[in-house]
Image (cartoon, rainbow, N blue to C red):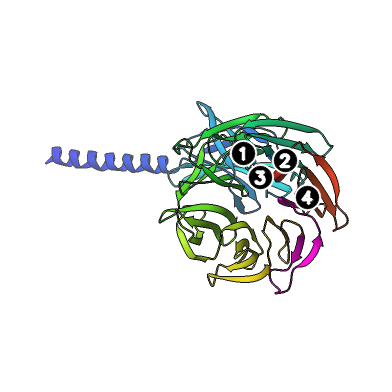
């Protein structure tokens, strides 16, 4: 009996000690100390912040966030080094829309339900949007020239072997791409050099048409391919997104805006055209509708309205597509004309160029487009910062301020096919 009592008391004591041990373990809080950098550092768009943090008594879970008061802002970062309790992180300021002001970096460590944290204040100075210049794509036969023209008039060229009629430049990546219609590679280049950055081979059979169009959104460069595939590229040439249109349709023009990714496409081997509204993240078809002709250009005018130009029965047609109603409406017709390009000035002001004139119109107010200039533009761009329109007309780039008489800023050896404005972010 005494042995049984001793055993019972021993078990009770063991349970008591175990409970005390668990309580002690559960009451252990992580300790977090940001060692460097010192508070008050100044950072800007595309800067990298290297931060050293001492973390002890954690269970391996550590998070890093940018704080605007109580608001948590996601910031790209990674753990680049760890030895013992010292953790080194790199934070990458890649959000071009991050506003100027004071922020705090919060490092949070966990141990079960317990947590510890430390903060370090920084100052972020938003990089003002600035036009760095523009790039053009010109060519004659199987030789194409990409020309960079910077804000102080420096001109640099790079030549591409092949029939390269497509150009896009992504200011966020600071990478441009050009593509051939048939044989050749998608070639990427920088603005400053403009040296080649990377090249991508299209797996289409040799001799067949490969690319249909290139364009850029806020983050990626997009290639519309003749095999029905759409691929988006990161600045290193890796594919960020890839999806295909259904039913054998070939994407010919595209535009990404608030309502989604609008693609004008042609059914392979026919004169049948469709508009597809895609989810820009996975390419799934949200809506589609018939299209009367082959689209030349697409713009976005706000209020769920895309603006399109296409040719029908020998006339240049302006159409508006409402993503809510899924209706394509013929806004206006320019008889006997071939549409060349379309330009958005604002939601309520667009320009359309035909073979011999440029007209302006308001896509939200039915009216007859009014004549602006009596010349043609293969491509047009608009700089909202300076209220300047850029026109690629023949071998010249013309600039017009506030719709005054345009003046020439660049003359190339061959006709210019496309022009792209280049910003610093």
What residue is pinned by disc 3? 104
Q: Nearer the viewer, residue 245 or 144?
A: 144
Q: In the rendering, at what x and y percent does residue 25 appear?
A: 41, 40
If the image is split into quadrants, where does the C terminus sit? top right
Circle nearer the N terminus (2, 4): 2
Badge 4: how crowded within 10 Å, few (<14), some, or many (20+)?
Answer: many
Q: Earlier in the sequence, mark 1 or mark 4?
A: 1
Quote the CA–CA distance across marks 3 and 1.
48 Å
Q: Which residue is mark 2?
A: 135
Residues under labels 2 and 1: Cα distance? 14 Å
| Element marked by disc 3 | strand
Q: Which residue is mark 1?
A: 164
Of circles 2 and 3, the one toward us is: 2
Between the residue at mark 2 and the residue at mark 4, the CA separation in whole angstroms equals: 11 Å
Instruction: Tell which residue pokes out farthest to the left in this image.
Output: 1
Horizontally, is 222 left or right of 425 in the view? left
Q: Residue tagged by mark 4?
A: 390
Cα–Cα span, label 2 and label 3? 39 Å
Q: Is residue 299 above or below residue 59?
A: below
Front: mark 1 or 4: 1
Which quarter of the picture shows residue 143?
top right
Which of disc 1 and disc 3 is earlier in sequence? Answer: 3
**Residue range of the region highlighted in magenta in the rendering:** 358-381
Residue 378, magenta (yes or no)? yes
């Amino acid at each position: 009996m005494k042995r049984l009592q001793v055993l019972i008391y021993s078990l009770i004591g063991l349970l008591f000690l175990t409970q005390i041990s668990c309580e002690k373990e559960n009451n252990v809080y992580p300790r977090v100390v940001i060692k460097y950098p010192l508070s008050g550092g100044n950072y800007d768009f595309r800067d990298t912040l290297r931060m050293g943090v001492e973390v002890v008594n954690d269970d391996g879970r550590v998070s890093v966030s940018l704080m605007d008061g109580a608001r948590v802002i996601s910031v790209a970062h990674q753990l680049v080094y760890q030895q013992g309790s010292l953790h080194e992180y790199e934070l990458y300021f890649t959000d071009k829309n991050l506003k100027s002001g004071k922020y705090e970096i919060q490092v949070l460590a966990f141990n079960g339900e317990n947590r510890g944290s430390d903060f370090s204040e920084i100052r972020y100075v938003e990089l003002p949007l600035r036009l760095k210049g523009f790039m053009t794509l010109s060519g004659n036969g199987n030789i194409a020239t990409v020309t960079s023209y910077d804000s102080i008039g420096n001109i640099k060229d790079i030549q591409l072997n092949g029939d390269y009629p497509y150009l896009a430049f992504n200011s966020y990546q600071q990478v441009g791409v050009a593509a051939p219609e048939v044989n050749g590679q998608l070639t990427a280049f920088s603005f400053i050099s403009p040296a080649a950055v990377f090249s991508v081979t299209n797996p289409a059979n040799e001799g067949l048409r490969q690319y249909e169009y290139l364009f850029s959104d806020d983050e990626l460069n997009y290639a519309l391919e003749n095999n029905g595939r759409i691929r988006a590229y990161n600045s290193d040439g890796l594919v960020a997104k890839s999806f295909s249109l259904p039913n054998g349709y070939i994407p010919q023009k595209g535009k990404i805006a608030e309502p989604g990714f609008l693609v004008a496409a042609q059914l392979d081997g026919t004169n049948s055209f469709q508009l597809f509204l895609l989810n820009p993240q996975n390419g799934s078809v949200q809506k589609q509708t018939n299209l009367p002709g082959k689209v030349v250009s697409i713009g976005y005018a706000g209020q769920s309205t895309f603006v399109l130009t296409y040719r029908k029965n020998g006339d240049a047609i302006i159409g508006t597509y409402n993503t809510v109603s899924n209706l394509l409406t013929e806004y206006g017709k320019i008889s006997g004309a071939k549409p060349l390009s379309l330009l958005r000035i604002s939601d309520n002001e667009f320009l359309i160029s035909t073979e011999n004139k440029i007209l302006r119109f308001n896509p939200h107010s039915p009216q007859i487009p009014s004549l602006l200039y009596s010349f043609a533009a293969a491509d047009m761009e608009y700089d909202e910062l300076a209220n300047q329109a850029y026109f690629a007309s023949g071998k010249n780039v013309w600039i017009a301020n506030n719709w005054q008489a345009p003046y020439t800023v660049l003359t190339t050896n061959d006709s210019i096919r496309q022009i792209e404005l280049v910003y610093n972010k």
